[in-house]
Amino acid sequence: MNKKKSTTHQLTRRTFIRQTGIAAALAAGVSSYLRLAPQAFANAGPATPFSFTPFTRPLPIPGRLAPATLNPAPGSIDAAVGSPAVYHGIAPEYNPAHAFNKASWVLTDPSTGKPFAEKRHILEYKRTQAELIPGVKTNLYGFNGTVPGPTIRARLGEPMVVRVKNSLADTETSLHLHGGHSPSHADGHPCFYVFPNQQRDYFYPHVAPKVNGKMDVAEVPSTMWYHDHGNDVTAFNVAHGLAGFCLLTDQLEENLIKNRYLPDVDLRDAAGNLLLAADGSTQQGRYDIPMAFTDQRFNADGSLWWDPFDHDGRIGDVFTVNGCAQPFLNVEPRKYRFRMLCASLARVYQLRLSNGQTMQQIGNDSWLLPKAIETSSLYLNPARRADVIIDFSKLAGQTIYLENIMTQTNGRKPDGVDPKAPIKMVKFVVGKTKNTAFPDFNVPTGVIRPHVNITAAEATVTRYFDFNRSNGAWQINGEFYNAYRCDAHIRKGAVEKWVLRNGSGGWWHPIHIHVEAHQVVSINGKAPPDFLKYKSDHTMLEDNTTVELLMKFRTFDGPFVFHCHNNNHEDMRMMKQMEICNIETSGATCPPTLNGQWFSVPQATCGVPTDYVKSHPGLFS
Amino acid sequence: MSNTNNTLTRRELLTGRWSEPVKPADSGRFVGPASSTPGGVSTSERASRRLPDCVVRNHREDTFRLVSDLISDQRVILGFIYTRCKGICPTTTLHMREAYRVLTARQAAPFRMITISVDPERDSPDDMLRHAAVNEAAGFPNWQFVVASPEDTLAIRRGLRLVDPDPVRDRNVSTHSGVLVLGNDRSNRWGGIPSGAAPVHIANTFERIARVGTLQEFAGFGQQPS
């Protein structure tokens, strides 16, 4: 699109907006070439003072995290807690003597017939600069200096150690692998910091919970993401670029790829050989594309606009995908798999294709669905991932757009869907021919990934959590977050039913529960929409909504958190802490797993399991 | 502004707690090196400059400019109360007081506390003094209990985003924000914590967000390194 055409478009749209009087509804989502009056942004901040021609730059595809040699070796005495090299040490589960017994979780590498060797990487938090808007240099934070961070490529049963260095001299950090099943010390608890200029070894065994001694194929994640999770700084850090993808495969997904039901996750030649980058890392497959959506707002000096006093939720007026405002993507007339991620802090998207074509959703959050869902639009709230197949095969030579039709003018909740006010996010330029060296894939018609329903009868515990606002601050069950208090003692192996309630009419909260997938049973007493019927790692709690969900707690002991994933709310402590404990070995008291200060006072006022109180009256008196 | 000794003596009698200098002590001024901060990556403009630099009167009837006299270059904790409050306000002041004591006992770097009335039409400096005295907080040298004009108070609340989106609710002072705003103007890093949080956590959070210096200075506050 050239400048002249853009201007014409702008005038037309402005006239249209004036005539139809929907300026306010449009204001949230307008791209910078459709600038509206600044007062329309009063809630969210001043309008970004830059104009640009959209769809002039190709969609950046994040590189992969390269293998690295860690010196000193993880788990060694020189890399233990308090050491100069790795001040924060590594999770105790890494120790062979630990009850987790990591060796028993390592799977056999099908290509060698031997157990997978441990993968090692380095991830460094550092300052960087990028042009989110063409020609405008913006200071950002990046993992290894890139925004989004390099994609981590993981394999089920292949242990991984990521040495995380915090080279941001001025802020404490904590890395969370979102949608993963990781030990507490590697889970990015908001208070398990990586202090400035220090390192921590994150141990990811990359396992799924075991059933009858084998890892449960139904629980294996595909599309995880990682982002900063430091207490008080999560929103700032994520907004400034500290997020990336982590793609995991297992035998099931590899078979789907081999049988041409899914495209290659990694870049391969026509003979199927891996094509590695110069640094030894794998590269993103041709027809499998990750897309991380953010909304940003800029100052005149090019820096990101940030209001440290805002706790409603940050809403931007420039839309970026993989760190590029309104990119284009050249595609072949064939099917593609897109891993879409809402990495925005507070914005909710409703995405559709401009030609009205449907898409096949094959995954929600980290997990592949049991069957593909045909859908004309995708609901993408903060932290949600949608694994989607788009078929361009009938569009040779044409151009279509991925559009957002959800309008939102402040961080509290969206204003609603307006199909007449689409915001173009990505332009797909469909070529005339496809590369026949790579056969197309078919959307699976049968079971993609099996799903095992948790039944309500299995639940031995019911907990109620009320999310509300009191005197301008967030509370859960009438309490503020306290990192020193355990709000829910959970027995390892237990099945629990959680009832999340939002009695407010003014706010939405995407509630993210760490460590395990949960299954949404009902939303306001009704069955959830298809894509939410299976596994999720977070649940959008809309206004005046009650969500019931079922969850199992397996594999790992220790403290984990659950919280609102509107990162501004999270930083204002809309968070609770649970401790999973092995009651069979620890006894009824479930002693603290870290040190005497943590959870030394069990609190009976929040999230207490019904039967637990009955069977342990002394504990909760 | 200076006070007469007579006024002071009257107050002294009223509270029985005067033993500290009247003006914010020079020690309240943060003189460490300007550090690069999360705020620094975002914008060169300090967030405090979005607040009105309005005239405020404290419980000693001194007048100050809010930003240039009290916030600029300082490490501050801002709280919000009204003196007839039967709800969250006594807790707010109590927790600020205990956090003040924790920070003092730790010999933390200089900091200030500012308690702002959200009911300026009714609250006088005398009322603020009474509130401070009743809560045993009137004698802290670097803690001002201030009243601004109603317009300025609204502007301050707007600047700090402590306005309820529902205008009816916002006009009702009893539902006012119980958030403590804490930060370091020099490093331009700010955060918030509910005033209902435990005082030691308020102090810890303040030291982490508004900290001066290095890791070791805030690593020990109850959070183990592993």
Image: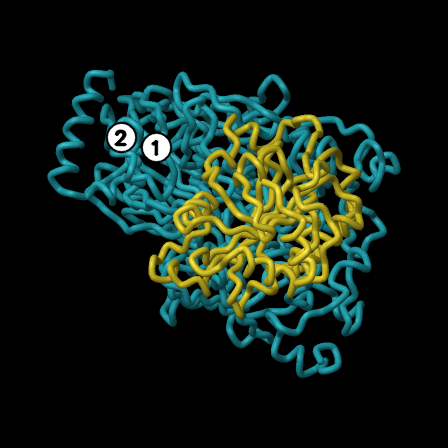
Chain colours: A cyan, B yellow
Up-down: is A593 above or below A384?
below
Of pointers 1 and 2, the one earlier in the residue sequence: 2
* In-image side of A590 versus B168 (left or right): right
Q: Are discs 1 and 2 less than 8 Å apart at CB?
A: yes
Q: Residues within 10 Å of mark 1 (few under 14, many from 20)?
A: many
Chain bearing mark 2: A
Image quadrant containing the N terminus of chain B: top right
Q: How many numbered marks, from 0 up?
A: 2
Say which residue appears at 78% left-offset and 52% top-offset: A101
Residue B133 seen by the camera? yes
Which residue is depicted at the point 46% across and 65% down?
B174
Identify the residue position indicated by label 2 in the image: A35
User: Circle 1 sits on which residue?
Assistant: A47
Front residue of this view, candidates A408 and A364: A408
- Residue A510 picture location, percent across and down: 46, 54
Seen in the picture, residue A65 relative to A215 is either above or below; the reply is: above
Amino acid under disc 2: Arg
Question: Splitting the image into 4 quarters, where does residue A176 fall?
Answer: top right
In the image: residue B189, left or right of residue A43: right
Which residue: 38% across, 41% down? A44
- Under circle 1, the secondary element is loop
Label 1 marks which chain's residue? A
Q: Is residue A187 visible?
A: no
- Determine which quarter of the picture holds residue A215: bottom right
Type of amino acid at the residue the image marks with label 1? Ala
Q: State left or right for residue A169 relative to residue A534.
A: right
Picture coordinates of residue B89, whole percent (x, y):
56, 63
- Quick one: which residue is furthest to the front in this view? B6
The answer as to whether the residues below labels 1 and 2 share one chain is yes
Q: From this viewpoint, which residue is outermost toward the right?
A: A77
**Dot 2 surroundings within 10 Å: few (below 14), some, or many (20 or more)?**
some
